Amino acid sequence: MGAVKTKRMPRAVREQQMLDAAVQIFGQRGYMAASMDEIAEHAGVSKPLVYLYLNSKEDLFTACIRREAAALTAAVRAGVRPGLPADRQLWDGLRAFFAYTAEHPDGWSVLHLQARTHGEGFAAEVATMREEIVAFVTELIVVAAREAHRDPDLPRREVAGLAEALVGAAESLATWANASPGTTARQAAATLMNFAWAGLGDLMDGRPWTPPGGP
Amino acid sequence: MGAVKTKRMPRAVREQQMLDAAVQIFGQRGYMAASMDEIAEHAGVSKPLVYLYLNSKEDLFTACIRREAAALTAAVRAGVRPGLPADRQLWDGLRAFFAYTAEHPDGWSVLHLQARTHGEGFAAEVATMREEIVAFVTELIVVAAREAHRDPDLPRREVAGLAEALVGAAESLATWANASPGTTARQAAATLMNFAWAGLGDLMDGRPWTPPGGP
Amino acid sequence: MGAVKTKRMPRAVREQQMLDAAVQIFGQRGYMAASMDEIAEHAGVSKPLVYLYLNSKEDLFTACIRREAAALTAAVRAGVRPGLPADRQLWDGLRAFFAYTAEHPDGWSVLHLQARTHGEGFAAEVATMREEIVAFVTELIVVAAREAHRDPDLPRREVAGLAEALVGAAESLATWANASPGTTARQAAATLMNFAWAGLGDLMDGRPWTPPGGP
Amino acid sequence: MGAVKTKRMPRAVREQQMLDAAVQIFGQRGYMAASMDEIAEHAGVSKPLVYLYLNSKEDLFTACIRREAAALTAAVRAGVRPGLPADRQLWDGLRAFFAYTAEHPDGWSVLHLQARTHGEGFAAEVATMREEIVAFVTELIVVAAREAHRDPDLPRREVAGLAEALVGAAESLATWANASPGTTARQAAATLMNFAWAGLGDLMDGRPWTPPGGP
DNA sequence: CATGAATGAGCGTTCATTCAT
DNA sequence: CATGAATGAACGCTCATTCAT
């Protein structure tokens, strides 16, 4: 099981194999229940090599978090075209987000569950990435508000809270969608757009948000 | 450290002391990193007594989850008056929720982070409580939709997703508010009502949701 | 379960109840696996009372050994009439022995298995009783030899070995008979008499030993 | 204390060292009273290494039983020449048996006392070996009877009891000889041959069994 | 580099035992 | 006496980590 045993690979490649294995084990077993033995075996390398390259369990976990966080933000960024209207950007970003988390459940588990549950240090590591996304969403809201009417009277702190709520709802939906088989990234994104953009009030008045290209 | 060493307490009292200590340690260290030694010491008792009363680490953790879940739902229920309009009920429930999580950060960590990360059994324990809350919110949305216009054409699955998003946003905001000093429960509730009830679209058109009693 | 809970019994009676329970638990679970909690509960008394009367687990076990050893030797002695011929005395003693061990398997387990397996002190305790029985058998053999022919040329040490072998065979047969349902004390005694008195050589020549009163 | 601290030994050697230490400690303290700490220290290794190689206390004990049982049966088998007459085979086997148990008192304690006292599983492990020996002795008796006179009218159950008594007597004498300094294996074997082959009746008539090569 | 050998430190759990009421 | 409350001391077991080859 695990990677095929090939000898004499360059360090960078070996490291990625180890991180692959570690993300999988950490994501499924949890940080503490994951054993370095299992990770090394799953990566197809010897345990001392893991320590040689990644120093310790903590460092290995941190490296996992960083790699997965970078991959997730990259995926979201790649899904968004800067020039388009705000709701379109949000819609594209959410679809990219839900698609990525569905395809990488172990990575998402590492970021959303494990990293936040085992000590301030790891939590701070994801917090950095999260702040980046929240900042992106905040900017989106501010720009949209500025476009909608000249006077942006939404105070900065208020908008930060809104962005936080939106991101939180997205994270929660991602986990929920992963646990509900048959739920597509597009459905999850549509649900959240309706909720966040139109709001429950509008929905009840029969005025839902409509995805670009028709419902 | 911990409780003052008082001897010969009745069992019920000692058990609550142990649960207090356990919630604190579990909430801060995480389930696996928490040691029974530290919990016992923090509770001001010897380890064998903890085992005599609560059997095992798993049972102790389960007891923590149950107690905290019951306390949280009780707090939310106590904040809501059934007869009032849907948005008023939601507003009241959210204020109660944010107030409680702010006052019991360790309990909230146990429920929201630790219990979900360490085994299906513990997750199922909180899932029961969460489903209760999601069901409450779902009902709220359905009733509100029925009141708004005669024909409630929101499909059930759609509503479930919305309720999930709302609860997820609330959970996320609770953690955020705990980490942002100076944020009151009222502010967090207002932010979420604006986000969820009015929606970003309405907000940008200058039509925010207004808390009862004026902004 | 265990003794009926009756209050205010004289000390001697309570002690016997405790020893009854202890012999049963020790015999079934083994010395170390037996817990004082279970013994106290089985005896229908509180744990501190057990300690008040019998001081410690070691002392309790020692008391069990002594009582059971005394009972066993008494049973054997009661089965033997001193005036009769040697083989008749041996036959009677063996029947009494096998009958007693069959009726008191827990006591027999305490004496033969548990006491010998858990430390020199306990083993010495049974050794005392065993030596008494071996001495009795030794005397029996010496007397029989003296009766058979004037010159008792069997050296003392040789006879001690023979008695030891006889007692060892009896002990082994007792355990074997307890484990083989349907084996009566009389059968076990007959087997051993054949083996010990006639010997395999005689048996093969068709000259078995015949129990008094016919085969 | 224990083995000299030699580092980096091959696994097979270390395992034997551990089994040596374990047999000694188990034999002297008993299964339950023996601690893995003491065994590890006595073997000159750390506790985790014991677990790495032998998995658990149960497995370690089982390994001890198997090794000692194999060694004992091998020693007895090596002492017996199949072609010789039955009493000669018995004589040779007994000498080998008493010699081995005298040289390995701890192993004998493990097999005869500890394994039989601590759980059905362990007892079954030795039972296999014992049955093998009892079967050997049974066969010896049957063959001897067949040689002595054409019609072997000793019923099978009777013979099984005789073999059981013989083996039991041997086991008991082994323990006795170990406790009586100055008793040689040859003396013990002679005593038992006299007892079992000639029988007490013959002894008293001045017709003892004579070891091959004269008394 | 890869591997087998090896361990310090700690964790969950249990039990005989005591003491205040 | 009987009981509930309480603990010191240990035990089986595991894991991250290191070093010699």
Image (cartoon, coloured by chain):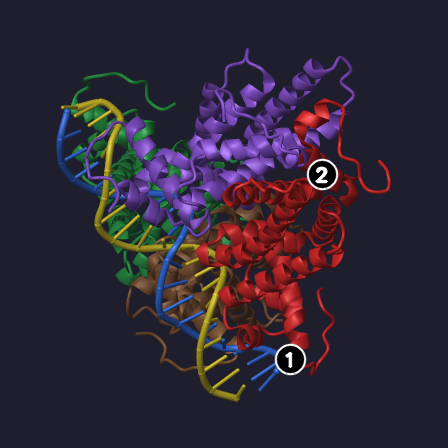
Chain colours: A green, B brown, C red, D purple, E yellow, F blue
Of the numbered discs 2 and 1, the one sitting upstream in the chain is 1
Q: Nearer the viewer, residue C15 or A95?
A: C15
Counting from the top left corner in percent of width and height, residue B151 is at 67, 50
Which residue lies at the image location 55% right of the left edge and 70% below the top edge?
B74
Closer to us: B186 or D15: D15
Nearer to the camera, A200 or B208: A200
Q: Amino acid at mark 2?
A: Met
Q: Residue at x 27, y 51 (%)?
A: A127
The label shown at residue C11 is: 1
- Viewer-proximal residue, C195 or A193? C195
Q: Amino acid at mark 1?
A: Arg
- E12 lies left or right of D90: left
Res C193 label: 2
Return the x and y of residue D163 as percentages of the image width and height: 65, 30
Q: Give me the C-alpha separation between circle 2 and circle 1.
A: 43 Å
* Residue B70 on image: x %, y %: 54, 66
